[in-house]
Amino acid sequence: MGPTDHVLYSATMKARDVAESHPDSLVIGADTIVVVDDKILGKPENRADAICMLKMLSGRSHEVYTGVVLIHQGTERSGVECTEVDFAELGNDIIARYVDTGEPLDKAGAYAIQGKGVVLIESIRGCYPNVVGLPLAMLSNLLKEFGVEPLCE
């Protein structure tokens, strides 16, 4: 299964699980992964796994994929966003100090662009909120398909 299918499947399963219990609600499911060398990086299992992921990303580009699925009364809409991220070259000491903050232990690819991990990144091409974990422009467009105008007046 490729990254697009992977995030769509996971987001769909999450959304369907909640929609089953709340059939009249508009449900949003999302899943984010990091992909480098065709390898999917989810959340690290432990400290050693986080260190391994960060070493793999060091000094390289990778993609962040997020799948978003909306379900309302049996109708589903979905989309996938992909953003390219360039990591700085990271020394072992920086990686160890970052992992010791605990921040990367529950993040896909073992980093949080919206947190301390921002200093690990040289540049991005694409949607910043996607790297955070929820591509808001795409979500806004999907909400409009359900007649929901996401902008407040």
Image (cartoon, helix red, strand yellow):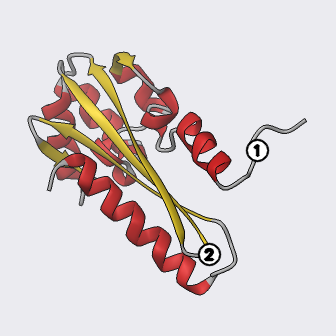
Q: Could you give the CA–CA distance between mark 1 and mark 2, rounded to whole angstroms?
A: 18 Å
- Residue 46 lies in quadrant: bottom left
Q: How many marks?
A: 2
The residue depicted at 51 percent of the width and 44 percent of the height is: 134
Q: Amino acid at mark 2?
A: Gln
Which quadrant of the view contains residue 71? bottom right
Q: Which residue is mark 2?
A: 73
Judged from this view, the residue extending furthest toward the right is: 153
Give above or below for 107 relative to 152. Answer: below
Vertical order, 76 against 141 (above or below): below
19, 53: nearer the viewer: 19
Q: Specify the farthest residue to the left.
A: 37
Report whether 10 appears left or right of 75: left
Q: Are marks 1 and 2 in contact (CB under 8 Å)?
A: no
- Which x, y percent locates residue 44? 25, 54
What amino acid type should be assigned to the residue bearing mark 1?
Glu
For the point 20% across and 39% down, the residue is: 35
- Say whether residue 113 is visible: yes
Placement of the N terminus among the 4 image quadrants: bottom left
Residue pointed to by mark 1: 149
Q: Is residue 2 left or right of residue 23?
A: left
Residue 64 lies, in percent from the top left, at: 32, 36
Q: Nearer the viewer, residue 91 or 121?
A: 121
Above/below status of 49 relative to 97:
below
SS assignment at label 1: loop
Examine the image and state in which quarter residue 51 appears.
top left
Q: Secondary structure at mark 2?
A: loop
Question: Residue 15 location, x and y as percent?
Answer: 49, 69
Can residue 43 be seen in the rendering of this structure?
Answer: no
Residue drawn where x is 38% and y is 54% of the image? 106
Q: Earlier in the sequence, mark 1 or mark 2?
A: 2
